[in-house]
Amino acid sequence: MEGFKSPEMIALPESATIPGTKLISPPPNQFTHVLVQRAVYHFAMPNAESADDGEFEKGTQVLLVRHESGAHCYVADAQGLYVALEFSALQRIV
């Protein structure tokens, strides 16, 4: 169209994508826990050298998928994001 300019295309780095194995489809529609604090998450179980892959805000509802008595657990959010985070950040929804 005359008078309009398309924005310049940019390519996001590969690190900006979510691995396909970390998305649950369909995403959960019922949740077991809520975050009582901001919590960073990881696509794999974190260790001392792990960089954070993202974060959830306080109040985010999640489905607890797996917790095997350690400091971390696996959860899924309303978009189907399946990640590891600190279990202590969760409070059970009654």
Image (tube, rainbow, N blue to C red):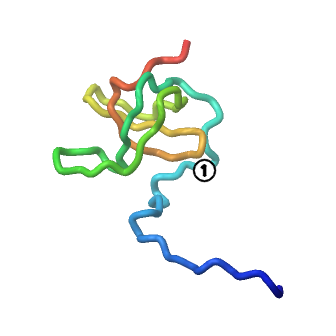
Q: Nearer the viewer, residue 62 or 51?
A: 51
Front position in the image: 67 or 33? 33
Label total for image: 1
Quarter that holds the C terminus:
top right
* Image x and y of residue 87, in percent: 34, 27
Q: Amino acid at mark 1?
A: Ser
Residue that lies at the very extreme toward the left in this rendered image? 48
Answer above or below: position of 33 versus 44: above
Q: Residue furthest bottom?
A: 2
x and y, in percent, of residue 57 in the image: 48, 34
Residue indicated by mark 1: 25
Q: Residue at x 36, y 37 (%)?
A: 85
Vertical comparison of 4 with 53: above or below = below
Quarter of image, res 19: bottom left
Asked whether 38 or 8 is in front, the reply is 8
Secondary structure type for disc 1: loop
Q: Residue at x 35, y 30 (%)?
A: 67
Q: Which residue is depicted at the point 61% across and 44% down? A: 27
Q: Left or right: where does residue 75 sit relative to residue 67?
A: right
Relative height, residue 79 to residue 86 (above, below): below
| Residue 43 in the image, given as x and y percentages of width and height | 37, 50
Q: Is residue 70 left or right of residue 48?
A: right
Where residue 55 sits in the image (x, y, percent)?
42, 42
Asked if 93 appears above or below 6 in the picture, the reply is above
Furthest-right residue in this view:
1
How packed is label 1: few (under 14 Cα within 10 Å), some, or many (20 or more)?
Answer: few
Q: Quadrant of the N terminus?
A: bottom right
